[in-house]
Image (tube, helix red, strand yellow):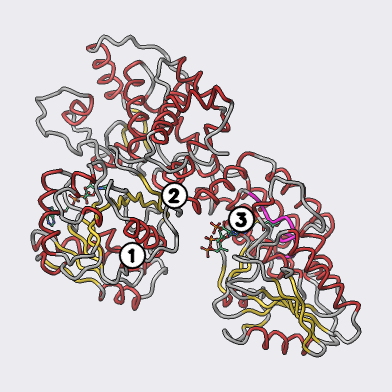
């Protein structure tokens, strides 16, 4: 059956797309739309048209899998121009998510009606693009430049209610009566001159107040740093006020094509599919029966335990949190409440929601209260003996069939599982700090972890808003394991004469939010320090002995002013020079290029080893981990995709030039001229 069909309801023609899963606007759909309009125009009994979709959503955008290939006619712009040109009123009937090209289809229709749960948005910017079917020109003409800017430049979808408030939706209709209501609405428009969004005038707000573009740039500076598409989006929206519609569309096309053929968009499209691929576990049927998770237990209410608990509370899943001492429990619960209240203060939660989440939390000092949990996540001290003791105890108390998970950062999950009688129900759930905010969840698959246990964890991660990737059991799993060689090189290089602020700046310039020495200052240089100022064996010991404990005391690797701005410290330069002299290291100038290569290439090399050992299922999973857990810049696609763009032969040559080891897989791929991704 054709993906686009039509139905006659007396004098109304309903054009229906059915292209699962998300009604992406592939070639067949575009042609179907154009044919549908032609049918309506050639049939005298038809007086108005409704465009709607079957399945879970209105068109969720252009078909991203077609990008980078020759486009079949009609292209989206042509297809939707035909909708707008119709002299019979055309109504978009929206449910689910009208995104990207889907939102552009809706914009080209003369009217838009939507169910209350619908969302509309132009998320192209998240793929390193801007809308390419006149969305940047039609939207400002309908809602004004000010309302259009965040939609085009930041790309978050808005609710039907908001869309109605800004004039993007003409009428909110019944959640369960979309088709009937849209047909009735269409009937009311018969005989009226169809309003065309290409002729709208709301965009004049940007002409009257041109400062709004600069203000927007400034307000969102941090969010858009390093990305090319947001600036193109701003220019396109500005053009909507300054140029004729036709010239504006031309300008949008030029900006779009430049982005589409660039590396950033390729990287971000890679990431889009990488995130979805990471959900799939090789060899496990995605439809496997899952273990219902109705109640979660958390052990330890410290830095991680509290944050982990919040994920479930926010998703409406009851949590029992167990601590050793009353004081620690109270502190932990207090932090959870404070975090929620801060969110409420920023307007992102209501007081009722705060109380609702808190009412699902049961604090306890007894392991026995975990007995009926379906999943227990341990977040106690990072020590194998402690973890083993805790898991043996949990195994005896928590009901059979429940999952026992550890949040360990480095320890061996198989060894932890070995003390239980249910190793197949044990796995690692490695959250990142702050656990209520950071997107990444590394799911660590033990040797014996059962398929349904793993899949349950995977599905649950989506429910709590995390991006998950599976790792095998190895020290540091995927993320921390790759961090180690970078940190090692950073430490070695500053002993060889590299400026430590250059090391940080190289990573900042690359697009990371901060470098390793800034990070150390932020976390506290004194974390894990033995606290004996007389015992100076490492650079860290020396800094701590000098009272340089990090940002919290105003000095660490850097000196900090009141505004927490950093300046390199003479005292630290001196300390480093003394250490280097003691170690007999010759100091030399080290270029930023060398620094970059020695920081990043060894990470790629470690990634190759992880793949070689089967610790990651695919290279793109490694990209997902680093983008979501460590601030690797999205617009480079993650370490493995980035290495592909640098050229694996160049990576290998760089490693060799700096006397660094080269993994077998990397060497082979480079020699074969192949890539990690594709
Ligand atoms: N093209 C091709 N495939 C798409 C797609 C698209 N636009 N959107 C989703 N898919 C695929 C996914 O890859 C996934 O495939 P898989 O099952 O094989 O992994 C499947 O559809 C289901 O997607 P999700 O797992 O993401 O489903 P959710 O229900 O979680 O989310 C969604 C649905 C909110 C629609 C989400 O898929 C999404 O955000 N899609 C992308 C929307 C987008 O970016 N649109 C703009 C495209 S660019 C454009 O339109 C350019 C135009 O201006 C010219
Ligand atoms: P933390 O020291 O802040 O909290 C640990 C808590 O566990 C303390 O409140 C302690 O009282 C409690 N505890 C200890 N033994 C217990 C027991 N037997 N029963 C109940 N409670 C007990 O430690 P943090 O940072 O939260 O780390 C916890 C785990 O998470 C560690 O395995 C760590 O490696 C891991 N992790 C930590 C990250 C971080 O950035 N802090 C990031 C990712 C993982």
Which badge, 3 or 2, is on the more N-terminal residue?
A: 3
Query: What residue is rendered at 37% in x and 34% in y?
Result: 613
Residue segment shown in magenta: 129-139
Dot 1 or dot 3: first in sequence order is: 3
Residue closest to the eye, 478 or 182:
478
Q: Which residue is mark 2?
A: 282
User: x and y percent of residue 427 in the render?
Assistant: 27, 52
Report the residue marked by disc 3: 153
Q: Position of residue 258 (x, y in %)?
A: 72, 43
The structure residue drawn at horizontal position 23% and vertical position 24%, both measured from the top left corner, is 539
As for residue 375 lying within the magenta part, the answer is no
User: Who's the residue at 44% across and 41% down the image?
Assistant: 622
How many angstroms separate mark 1 from mark 2 (CA)? 41 Å
Q: Is residue 21 visible?
A: yes
**Contact? badges 3 and 2 (CB < 8 Å):** no
Label 1: how many Cα within 10 Å (few below 14, some 14–19, many 20+):
few
SS of the residue under disc 2 = loop
Marks 3 and 2, how far apart at CA: 36 Å
In the structure shown, which secondary structural element does the residue marked by tag 3 occupy? helix
CA distance for labels 1 and 3: 27 Å
Is residue 193 depicted above or below 155 in this figure? below
Q: Provide the residue designation for mark 1.
A: 342
586 left or right of 39? Answer: left
Between 649 and 341, the residue placed more toward the observer is 649
Q: Is residue 595 above or below residue 634?
A: above
């Amino acid at each position: 059956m054709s993906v686009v069909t039509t139905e006659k309801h007396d004098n109304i023609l309903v054009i229906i797309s059915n292209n699962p899963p998300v009604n992406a606007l592939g070639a067949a759909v575009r042609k179907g739309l154009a044919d549908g309009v032609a049918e309506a125009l050639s049939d005298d009994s038809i007086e108005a048209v409704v465009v709607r979709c079957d399945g879970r959503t209105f068109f969720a955008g252009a078909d991203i899998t077609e990008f980078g290939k020759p486009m079949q006619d009609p292209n989206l712009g042509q297809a939707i121009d035909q909708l707008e040109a119709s002299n019979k009123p055309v109504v978009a009937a929206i449910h689910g998510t009208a995104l990207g090209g889907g939102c552009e289809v809706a914009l080209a229709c003369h009217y838009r009606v939507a169910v209350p749960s619908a969302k509309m948005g132009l998320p192209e910017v998240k793929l390193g693009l801007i809308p390419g079917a006149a969305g940047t020109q039609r939207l400002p003409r309908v809602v004004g430049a000010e309302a259009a800017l965040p939609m085009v430049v930041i790309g978050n979808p808005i609710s039907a209610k908001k869309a109605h408030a800004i004039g993007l939706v003409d009428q909110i209709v019944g959640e369960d009566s979309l088709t009937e209501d849209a047909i009735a609405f269409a009937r009311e428009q018969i005989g009226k001159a169809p309003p065309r969004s290409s002729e709208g005038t709301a965009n004049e707000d940007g002409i009257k107040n041109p400062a709004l573009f600069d203000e927007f740039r400034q307000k969102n500076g941090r969010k858009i740093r390093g990305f090319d598409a947001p600036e193109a989006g701003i220019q396109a929206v500005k053009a909507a006020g300054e140029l004729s519609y036709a010239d504006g569309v031309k300008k949008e096309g030029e900006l779009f094509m430049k982005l589409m053929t660039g590396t950033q968009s390729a990287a971000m499209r890679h990431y889009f599919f990488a995130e979805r691929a990471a959900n799939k576990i090789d060899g496990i049927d995605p439809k496997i029966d899952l273990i219902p998770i109705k109640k979660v237990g958390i052990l330890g209410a410290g830095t991680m335990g509290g944050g982990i608990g919040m994920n479930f509370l926010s998703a409406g899943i009851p949590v029992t949190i167990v601590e050793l001492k009353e004081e620690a429990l109270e502190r932990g619960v207090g932090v959870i409440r404070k975090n929620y209240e801060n969110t409420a203060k920023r307007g992102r939660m209501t007081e009722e929601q705060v109380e609702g989440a808190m009412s699902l939390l049961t604090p306890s000092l007894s392991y026995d209260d975990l007995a009926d949990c379906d999943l227990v996540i341990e977040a106690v001290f990072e020590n194998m003996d402690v973890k083993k003791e805790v898991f043996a105890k949990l195994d005896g108390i928590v009901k059979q069939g429940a999952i026992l998970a550890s949040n360990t950062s480095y320890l061996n999950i198989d060894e932890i599982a070995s003390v239980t009688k249910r190793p197949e129900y044990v796995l690692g759930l490695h959250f990142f700090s702050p656990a209520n905010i950071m997107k990444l969840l590394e799911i660590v698959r033990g040797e014996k972890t059962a398929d349904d246990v793993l899949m349950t964890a995977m599905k649950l991660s989506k429910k709590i808003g995390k991006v998950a990737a599976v790792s095998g059991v190895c020290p540091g799993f995927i993320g921390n394991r790759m961090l180690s060689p970078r940190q090692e090189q950073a430490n070695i290089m500053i002993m060889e004469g590299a400026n430590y602020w250059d090391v940080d700046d190289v990573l900042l310039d690359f697009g990371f939010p901060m470098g390793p020495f800034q990070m150390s200052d932020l976390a506290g240089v004194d974390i894990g320090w033995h606290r004996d100022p007389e015992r100076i064996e490492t650079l860290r010991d020396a800094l701590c002995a000098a009272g340089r404990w990090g940002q919290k005391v105003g000095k660490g690797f850097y000196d900090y002013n009141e505004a927490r701005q950093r300046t390199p410290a003479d005292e630290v330069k001196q300390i480093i020079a003394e250490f280097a002299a003691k170690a007999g290291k010759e100091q030399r100038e080290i270029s930023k290029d060398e620094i970059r290569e020695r920081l990043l290439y060894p990470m790629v090399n470690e990634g190759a080893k992880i793949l070689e050992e089967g610790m990651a299922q695919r290279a793109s999973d490694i990209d997902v981990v680093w983008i979501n857990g460590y601030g690797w810049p999205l617009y480079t696609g993650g370490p493995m995709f980035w290495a592909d763009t640098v050229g694996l032969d160049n990576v290998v040559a760089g490693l060799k030039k700096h006397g660094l080891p080269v993994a077998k897989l990397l060497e082979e791929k480079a020699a074969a001229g192949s890539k990690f991704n594709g």
